[in-house]
Image: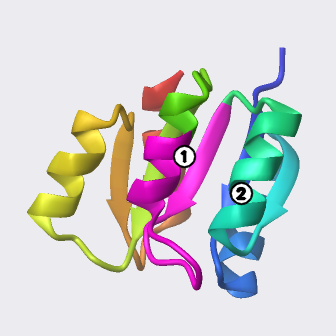
Amino acid sequence: MNKKVLIVDDSLYMRTIIKDTLTDAGYEIVGQAANGESAIDMALELLPDIITLDNILPDMLGLDILKTLKGESIEAKVLMISAVGQQSVIDEGMRLGIGGYIVKPFSSEQLLEAIKKLA
């Protein structure tokens, strides 16, 4: 079965790169969100298998989205993608249950490898 993916990033460019890479690899993109509020709404509505989550969004941090989704018992595996490779952010993400973390800029190989590890 194809894994359903929700892409969360405020950059259209980043969302497009992630979408193209994952679509080519056989993943089904069920939604794209440019901010935290729509990310949470889409995650609850679409119940994706995987969420790619940018940490810095216009309205909230990816870590805050994680906390909310955890409270809603969302089962999706989360791959955090951020330009900020701060250990404290990674540690907090791991504590909240993220399955992986990659830092921008990344190659499509890095993205696919990280997504495969989640499965």
The verdict on residue 97 being magenta is no
Q: Is residue 108 above or below residue 23?
A: below
Mark 1 residue type: Leu
Give the percent coordinates (x, y) of residue 16.
Answer: 77, 74
Q: Residue at x 87, y 37 (%)?
A: 45
Q: CA distance from mark 1 to mark 2?
A: 21 Å
Residue 62 magenta: yes
Crowding near the residue tagged with mark 2, few <14, some 14–19, many ≥20 C-alpha atoms within 10 Å: many
Residue 101 visible here:
yes
Q: Is residue 74 above or below residue 16?
A: above
Residue nearer the viewer, 39 or 49 = 39
| Quadrant of residue 27 within the rendered picture | top right
**Tag 2 residue:** 39
Pick the quarter of the image with the C terminus: top right
Q: Identify which residue, 73 or 83, lies in the foreground.
A: 73
Q: Which residues are magenta?
A: 50-68
Image location of residue 103, percent across then percent down: 34, 68
Residue 65 image offset from top left, x and y in percent? 52, 53
Which residue is drawn at the image coordinates 22% and 54% (left, top)?
90
Q: Secondary structure at mark 1?
A: helix
Q: Which residue is mark 1?
A: 112
